[in-house]
Image: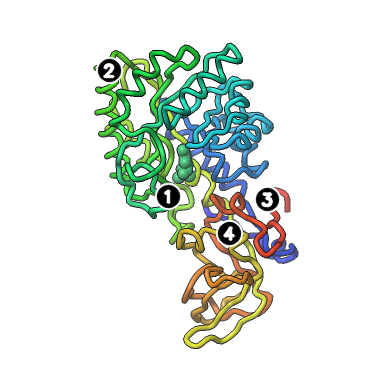
Amino acid sequence: MNFNFPVDALNQLQTPFYFYDIDLLHATLDAVKKEAGEYGFKVHYAVKANANDRILNSIKEAGFGADCVSGYEVQKALEVGFNAEGVVFAGVGKADWEINLGLDNDIACFNVESIPELEIINELAEKKRKVAKVALRINPNVNANTHHYITTGLEENKFGINQWDLENVIEVLKNLNHVELEGIHFHIGSQITDLMSFKDLCIRVNELQEWFISHQILPKVVNVGGGLGINYEQPDTESIPDFKSFFKIFDEFLELKPGQELHFELGRSIVAQCGALLTKVLYVKNGVNTKFAIVDAGMSDLIRPALYQAYHKIENLSSDKAIEKYDVVGPICESSDCFGKAVDLPETNRGDLITIRSAGAYGEIMANRYNLRALPSAYYSDEI
Ligand code: PLP
């Protein structure tokens, strides 16, 4: 199923804005549900990827849980109507109010990243006479082979408990009466396109499971995080990621013990392809070796190219003239405010409608007001 651009209607709207193809979102959700359902795997959607109300609502309606990385995300997930039993909360630096919020709402699990955090959750839970369910986020030291800013599972990264510290964690846990070990948690990074990284993760998880069993512990939940990448180069050939192969890797290589559940926290792969950023050309100007197409969207609307040198496919929806090369840049006073260099576009002119594809994940949610610009608005295929 392809992303559908109703160009005439989109041309009437004030740019820049995000446009979501709701049919594509639903088709993607159906695919995840079907493929995870094959094996009885449970998926919590990673709210950080996109917390737009319409998107969250569809995801909640489809029956997914919510994976949150801040108290604000926990609050949002609950407001939108996710059941507290389907809310998990990760993050290396949870503040007391965020932990209290999770405790007050009896969320499913805190994914804990250090011994001091474990102790604070225990202390706050004790004050409320509660027992918090926790999963240990373990740093598996598995390379995700992705951009270093979105690699999270190496010992040099700040995330998770290192394996050499596990013995201490188990000792500490024995003395904490207000936390209950529910599971083990991993997340090695994002935009992972080499599925072998997930196989490596499975092998490491199996080793760790044996370690836990040798300590007479069988975690009920194994949570392997998110990270499945999408095809930014060709959004239309792979508008729905290959969830089948992804889940199959875990079925084949991760050895679950009887009674254990396997959980996932997918973000990008669920929402990236259903969103696009729409912008209009303000000016075309000749540079030394290139032409600049200066558009009205900037890095404040979509920061991924500036932050991660990320590639997004750029298309001109208004022109079908001969192909030329353009550097597509925004109006912000930073040289990094560039969406693509030497982009092949049909001859482009002022007023042309440009789309920056695969922007549904880590797009609108990362928008900011740099240069005091307005936040981009959002429109939906079933509302225009
Ligand atoms: N879980 C955790 C703990 C994360 O930090 C992230 C994002 O990096 C995700 C899940 C979602 O990852 P992705 O959007 O790559 O699926």
**What residue did someone put label 2 on?**
213
**Alpha carbons under labels 1 and 2: distance apart:** 31 Å
Query: Which of the two labelled residues, at mark 4 and mark 3, occupies the earlier sequence position?
Result: 4
Q: Secondary structure at mark 4?
A: loop
Residue 87's label in the rendered image is none
Which percent across, then down, holds residue 380? 68, 50
Tell me: residue 101, above or below residue 141: above
The answer to whether the residues at label 1 and label 2 have Cβ atoms under 8 Å apart is no
Sequence-wise first label, 2 or 4: 2
CB of mark 1 near ligand 1 (< 8 Å): yes
Q: Are marks 4 and 3 in contact (CB under 8 Å)?
A: no
Q: Is 185 drawn above or below residue 198 in the view shown?
A: above
Residue type pointed to by label 2: Ile
For residue 17, side relative to residue 323 (left or right): right
For residue 344, above or below residue 88: below
What's the residue type where badge 4 is placed?
Leu
Can you identify the residue that label 1 sits on? 150
Residue picked out by circle 4: 302
Q: CA distance from mark 4 to mark 3?
A: 18 Å
Question: Mark 1 near mark 4, Cβ–Cβ under 8 Å?
Answer: no
- First-in-chain label (2 vs 3): 2
Q: CA distance from mark 2 to mark 4?
A: 45 Å
- Placement of 114 over or under 361, stated as above or below: above
Q: Nearer the viewer, residue 175 or 280?
A: 175
Front residue of 354 and 129: 129
Give coordinates of residue 336: x percent, y percent: 52, 69
* Residue wearing tag 3: 380
Residue 149 in the figure: left or right of residue 67: left
Cα distance in 3D space between marks 3 and 1: 29 Å
Q: Which residue appears at 34% of the width and 45% of the height?
A: 156
Which element is circle 2 on? helix
